[in-house]
Image: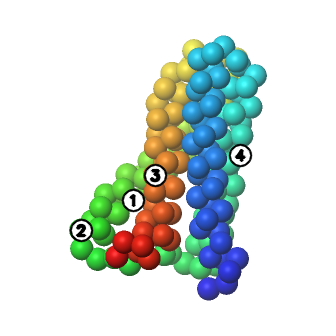
């Protein structure tokens, strides 16, 4: 596998970590009444997640899937993290775009209602994306 394809795993984890940081900062900003900062953080989180998705699809297309190489209980733990991560990841883009569309139209009550559902899902997916990366790329070498 090429070094470029292999490096996409780390790059994608970085985009997930950045998205999580921006989401938390955006939540803090809106709770502090800093709407401009909130908007910048949330749009940046959306961009980071879009870049993650592009990198993930590129890595999958060029390098296939990466399998968790440690059998037994650790494999079961990995799957326990991966399954909800994957299922919830499917919902993030539509929810985030739906919330964004309401915000851009000035429908802030509807935006808030959707964001209350979307935010924890998006944060969970971003954080567990980093955990999945660490387990796939670093866990086996250090703990198996």
Asked where in the image residue 46 lies, by quadrant, the reply is top right
Mark 4 packing: few (<14 Cα in 10 Å), some, or many (20+)?
some
Marks 3/4 in contact by CB < 8 Å: the verdict is: no
The CA span between labels 3 and 2 is 18 Å
Q: As displayed, is residue 42 above or below residue 107?
A: below
List the residue tagged with mark 1.
Answer: 82
- Decide: few, some or many residues near mark 1? Use Cα within 10 Å; few <14, some 14-19, many ≥20: some
What is the number of the mark on residue 137?
Answer: none
**Residue beneath disc 2:** 73
Query: Where in the figure is residue 94, as x and y percent of width and height?
Result: 57, 41
For the residues labelled 3 and 1, the Cα–Cα distance comes to: 8 Å
Q: Secondary structure at mark 4?
A: helix
Q: State whether residue 37 is above or below residue 82.
A: above
Which is in the foreground here, disc 2 or disc 1?
Answer: 2
Q: Are marks 3 and 1 in contact (CB under 8 Å)?
A: yes
Question: Residue at (53%, 48%) from the top-left corner?
Answer: 126
SS class of the residue under badge 3? helix
Mark 3, other Cα within 10 Å: few <14 / some 14–19 / many ≥20: many
In the picture, measured across the screen, residue 121 lies left or right of residue 98, that is: left
Name which residue lies at 63% across and 56% down.
Answer: 14
Write down the residue under mark 4. Answer: 47
Q: Which residue is mark 3?
A: 128
């Amino acid at each position: 596998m090429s070094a470029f394809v292999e490096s996409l795993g780390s790059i994608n984890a970085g985009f997930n970590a950045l998205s999580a940081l921006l989401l938390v900062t955006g939540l803090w900003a809106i709770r502090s009444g800093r709407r401009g900062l909130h908007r910048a953080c949330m749009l940046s989180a959306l961009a980071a997640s879009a870049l993650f998705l592009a990198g993930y699809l590129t890595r999958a297309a060029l390098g296939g899937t990466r399998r968790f190489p440690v059998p037994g209980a650790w494999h079961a733990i990995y799957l326990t993290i991966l399954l909800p991560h994957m299922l919830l990841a499917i919902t993030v883009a539509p929810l985030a775009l739906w919330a964004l569309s309401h915000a851009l139209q000035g429908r802030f009550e509807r935006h808030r209602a959707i964001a209350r559902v979307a935010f924890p899902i998006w944060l969970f997916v971003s954080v567990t994306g980093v955990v999945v990366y660490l387990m796939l790329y670093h866990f086996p070498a250090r703990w198996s």
